[in-house]
Image: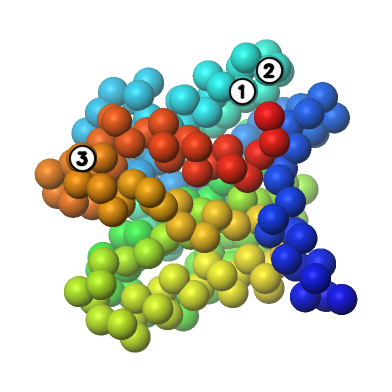
Amino acid sequence: MKKLFFVLLLLSPLSLSAEATNQYKKILVLGDSLSAGYNMPLEKGWVNLLRQELSKRSHEITVINASVSGDTTGQGLSRLKPLLAKHKPNLVILELGGNDGLRGIAPPLIKRNLATMIDMAKDSGSEVLLLGMQILPNYGKRYTEAFHQNYLDLAQEKAIRLIPSFLDGVGQKPDLMQKDGIHPNVKAQPYLLKNITSAFSF
């Protein structure tokens, strides 16, 4: 029964019907360069596209982008508490871990930092949407699998919603990536938005 409930939790969309619109007045995005609009105008990034999309449905929804390029989970953790106190979000979209992976930080430490952030957000009264990451395969199978498994395990352990792979449909397409092969380009931002809104019902 518990397993069935978990499956339904992951698959059920966050409803932005009239009822949900009243629920989610403030959305806080805490991420790294993938959400900070690295190497592009901020208005072209997926967070601003989300803001524009939601504004069509309600003028009362505020989207706060607290993402910083280069941030690790440890840096995000150090910034989250004052952000929660200042903005009092109803929903936290957590997009961190990629820079930890690039630095080869131990997966258990990454998981611990993410878990602490999830707990902080939930304790403040906010729901959490976790964006899963996958690291480049040249880091080795053992590391890459443990890295990605963190997100799957946290979603189950913390009973939060998860997008298993935020860059799904983007990272595999060179024409949607910048020359560094790490950061999505401007053309990719609507696809990232679609990955986000797959967790919502419009």
User: x, y (%) of residue 170?
Assistant: 34, 47
In what element is the residue under mark 2?
loop
User: x, y (%) of residue 107?
Assistant: 41, 77
Q: Name the quadrant containing residue 154.
A: bottom right
Which residue: 52% across, 60% down? 164
Q: Which mark is residue 54?
A: 1
* Residue at numbered disc 3: 175
Q: Cβ–Cβ below 8 Å for labels 1 and 2?
A: yes
The amino acid marked with disc number 3 is: Asp
* Residue at numbered disc 2: 57
Q: Is residue 102 above or below residue 179?
A: below
In this picture, residue 14 sits left or right of residue 1: left
Which residue: 50% across, 73% down? 150
Closest to the observer: 121 or 44? 44
The amino acid marked with disc number 1 is: Leu
Q: Name the quadrant containing residue 40.
A: top left
Mark 2 vs mark 3, CA separation in Å:
32 Å
